[in-house]
Image (tube, coloured by chain):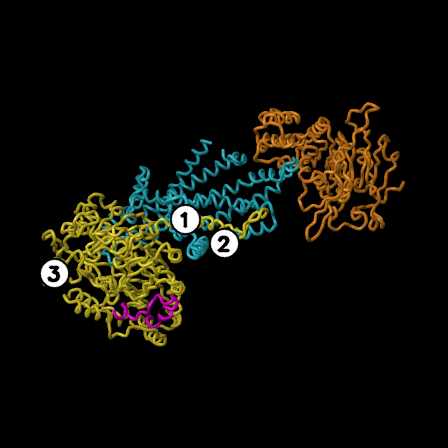
Chain colours: A cyan, B yellow, C orange
Amino acid sequence: MIRLVLRRVGLAIPILVGVSVIVFLLMTVVPGSPEAGLVPEDATPEEREAIRDSLGLDDPLPLRYLEWVGNALQGDLGYSEQRRREVADLLGQAWGNTFVLALVSAIFGIALGLLLGYLAGTRRGKAVDRLVSVLSLGGLSVPSFFLAIILLAVFAGGLQLLPSGGADFDDPLSAARSLVLPVLSGSLITMAITARVTRAGIVDVLGADFVETLRAKGLSELEVRRHVLRNAISPVLTTSGVQIGALLGGSVLVETIFRWPGMGLLLYNAISARDLVVVQGATLVIALTFVVVNLLVDLLQAAIDPRVRGTMS
Amino acid sequence: MTRPARRGRLIPSLATLLLAISLLLSACGQSDSRAGSSSTSGGTLQIAMSAANIPFPSTPPNQGYEGYRFVGNNIYDALTRLDLDQADTLPTPQPALAESWEMADDLMTYTFTLRQGVTFHDGTAFDADAVVFQLDRLKNPEFEFYSQTDAATAASATRYIDSWEKIDDHTVQITTTQEYTWLQWDLLSIYFPSPTVVREFGNQDYNQHATGTGPFRMTEYVDGEVMELTRYDEYWRGPAKLDQIILYPQPEAASRLSMLQSGEVNWAEVPSPDSMSQLEADGYQVFLGKYPHGIMPRFNMFREPFRDNLALRQALNYALDREGAAALMNGAGYPAKQWVYEGHPAYAPDNPGYSYDPERAKQLLAEAGYEPGELTLNFGYTTGGSGNMFPDVMMQKLQADFRAIGVEVTLTPVEWTVLISIGLDGLDSEQWEDIDVLWASPAAGMLPTGYNSSFMCKRPGGQANAAGMCDEVVDEQLTLASQQAEVADQNAHLQQMMDQAVSEAYFLFWMHDLNLRVMSPDVQGYVHPQSWWVDFTTISVGGDS
Amino acid sequence: MSTTTQVSPTHSSPWLEPRAAGAPEPPPPALRVTDLVTEFRSHRSSLRAVDGVSFSVPRRQVLAVIGESGSGKSAMLRSIIGINPPSALIEGRVELNGVDILSLPARERRRVRGRDISMVFQDPLTALDPVYTIGQQLVETVLKHRPGASRADARQRSLELLELVQIPSAEARLRAYPSQLSGGMRQRVVIAMAIAGRPQVLLADEPTTALDVTVQARMIRLFRQIQQEVDAGLVLVTHDLGVAAELADEVAVMYAGRFVERGTAQQVLTAPQHPYTEGLVEANVRAGQDRRPRAIIGAPPSLTRLPAGCSFAPRCSYAVADCWSTPPPVRTIDAAGSSPSGSSSVPHWSRCLLVPQQ
């Protein structure tokens, strides 16, 4: 198990390097200048040059990249002139916000998805199954920002039941209230995907021969389903890992609509402002998050499913 | 509305479930910790800004004029200020931290008498040293606290300043680089932070400790989330009425609307125009009014087809159905005849400007040498960014209008940052030379100092001439205007400049913004000025309720 | 119906130790199935997979049911133990020790399952839950049928079961996952699980088909041994006549949901009286002689549209006109004529019009 972790961490290094190089290159290739937001529209070439110089924008590309890597390795992710803050500071705040939202969204979406998928899978062809398939199809096709705006209009604007946004962690109640709408809209896709994968897994496993063995053993339907669920959970974990990773990357639209300044918004704004240091830092954190989440999911999967263990070691 | 889920029915519909959860949560009480935290007379004004982030409380702020409006003018003062407490005329510079000033006959030497007894929010006194400190910070690269970023952002306001000098504790002398009578306009945007605070925290950490002399002090600032401004009782113009102003960034119009309707804010910037009538019916105060802001795209004058082709430029101006476009945005815009609106000091009164006349447009197109269908224009525009009105609707309408006279338009949407970059690079740069027409959303005529970047060919300092417009008459009149001691003379020259620019159809004179802004009924004392800026000291919330 | 057959309690099979003469009164049959019908209904059509099957099996006896795939053998076993899908409609009686388990409430029926009657499935590779260890699955089974037992007891019992089915280093196997065992080992585990409750009746659905040929023989021996050990009756479904010959006391031939021939293993396999059985035996013999087996011409009929007369008629080379129109009667074969030993009181019968009436 330790070897596995080490190997994965080792594998993560080329991934992180690759991601940061690609992001770096993309950011220097896209049109639009990083200093555009820092100078007035009638800036003189000298004024522009001065700020480009202070941002180090005219240094050779490899040098700029290596400098960034060197500093990053020493734990210094740089200072964003556009945001007037330390990048690490920005990332900490955004990641914290996103983490709370992602965690609750993931738990809610995956739990609900599991429940729905389980109900649908075990009641195949029944009304519940059809309802769930409509719901999950809806969840996959309705854009989350559309749902977000509808929820906002109904529950915040119309009924005035819930706050329209903001990450308000003053007390548990207000935190819970401010989480409801973003979680509902952010977890929709997770819910839908989990429900679908769970349903497919359950249907698949229910058709497996060993289920007959279990029934012939005299197990109750509930006991049989415990077996079924544990067998069906593996693909659910895989997709959950991807979903959690994506949730931890932050959703620009949900974060914008609900004023939830997390990673998605940070990254989006940084890209818009061509704020290279923040983009680099944020991608690094997001990539790292993905690696860690997937590692955790794999470990969990190995703990649950011996077949996976075989393929991993 | 919902039935309790019966046993045996395992899953109620999702909608019921969601509803149940929200009812459960809302049942626990609705108190918003921020709302109504203060019960004294002035109340709390909570604002949903259209900016994507809280503007920096730096000197100057970022996020364009929205930053000046909500953050800059509230925390800071400048030597001059605009009279924003009236809606009748275009606000002009008034004494602020400078009690008075004198311009020498050379039209270059200004002597400012500073107001006495003004203190910063940290209790230190505002004086000549504070003025020199800030000008050093923005103009003197040798200065210990020189801020490269602030200097860059403030560059257009400090461009004509040549030198500055403390005469005594309450007198400062500033000289300009050339004959220049608009220094008091430039000084509007040069805010003064407490030198003590800058020294203590340095430029990089200053934002978290922003301290000025303005009517409100910053009492909470969470980057990206919220800023709380609290009335400064020692304010030199007398304390503001409001207890607090709370700013939330929200670039999404639908969300701003929800925030207003749910009572989380009592002021929402630019909600969707579709919601206007409903909001009015619900008792909200909906404000619309002309102010110096419009969509005035620029023709690429570096090359064909617009260079030396007045008829074509005019044809396109006549082809625009501005009324139709304004209707598409429910009247949140006002058709433009010239670059500034009628009644603006720079409006050329004898020039009829442009109206919708497709027949004339077709005729002019033929005169310009183009058969219908022969010309395809590449139009670069931005899809977002605050202060750009409603680009998608407007561009679709424009495409249809132009097609009606036989001109095709290729839409090239770009990010706001890219549009700004194009402006800096110029349409003659290799990267952007394919663009024929470029979207522009100038603060058209808010400050006379702003004409430079849109109108002038050879500019002081040699800024990029984004669209390649070059007209001797325009340059001459603009320069003259900036060198007149009398405001009336300045305006006369500006009108001649405008007359020339309109006749030569250097722009697509398209749409004035009407500055749509909505407030809840309990906001009182608000004046909708002809400006991007607002005077918050006159406002109160919920006085009699 | 007149097809019910009584199995003689004193019958002895070649591999059973002969009982002393004058043995005590024979026990009642462990399993008695009467007029079992299994019908799968959908809104479109209904399909009779099992169409009125009756038989009984005493303890320590083996009934082999042979036939092609799709003849209803598996559905029959599943109906007996009660694990058919909910869409299956089951009629008739299935008596265990005289109690009709079909009429029991679901809860009690489940208690019977695995304890009094259990089943071994065709494919050991898929018959075990892959994500639980062998030990977990065995312990679960043991605990199910001995609710009072402690986990340690159950584990001990599991170990004994594994030893009973001759699994080497059983202790270590308990911690293994199914995927870590060979097919033969897994089948032993399945058998161990099936006998965990000491059932009176074992059902086996082609228990050797999926196994390697070399393992098959050993598995058959194990089966015989285990069955004797636990003293259970065995219903063995197979299409391998060799297995049937080696294990079975009696053989029933199933075609289109019905038994078409029934008798002692020797009677049926050496002197088949039904053209279908004849075809099966022929195909098997030729296969044994390493020649291309001669398959029976045609395919089993669709159970949704059975012919009016004999369901085998369309494939039968002996068929006469009456076969197409008249349901074939059950004809008992002259014992003297067909059974060389003559010792059996099991009537050998065939459901064929061509068998001469006695």
Residue B102 tag number: 3
Q: Nearer the viewer, residue B172 or A173?
A: A173
Would residue B410 be seen by someone viewing this image from the given angle? no
Residue placed most toward the observer, B216 or A52: B216
Q: Is residue B284 positioned above or below B2 on the image? A: below
Residue A170 visible in image: yes
Residue A149 image position (x, y, % from top left): 43, 55
Q: Earlier in the sequence, mark 2 or mark 1?
A: 2
Instruction: Look at mark 2 in the image and give the residue it sits on.
Output: A141
User: Residue B409 at what x, y percent from top left?
Assistant: 38, 66
Crowd rating for badge 1 (residues with CA inside 10 Å; few <14, some 14–19, many 20+):
many
Few, some or many C-alpha atoms within 10 Å of disc 2 (few <14, some 14-19, many ≥20)?
few
In which quadrant of the rendered image does the C terminus of chain B lie? bottom left
**Mark 2 belongs to which amino acid?**
Ser
Q: State the SS at label 3.
A: strand
Question: How many marks on residues?
Answer: 3
Counting from the top left corner in percent of width and height, residue B311 is at 30, 73
Q: Looking at the image, which residue sits at the far top?
A: C20
Q: Nearer the viewer, residue C226 or B319?
A: C226
Q: Secondary structure at mark 2?
A: helix
Give the mark toward the camera: 2 or 3.
Answer: 3
Q: Amino acid at mark 1?
A: Ser
Report the residue at 24% width, 72% height from top.
B348
Q: Secondary structure at mark 1?
A: helix
What's the distance in space between the residues labelled 2 and 1, CA to CA? 25 Å
The residue where tag 1 is placed is A178
B61 or A26: nearer the viewer: B61
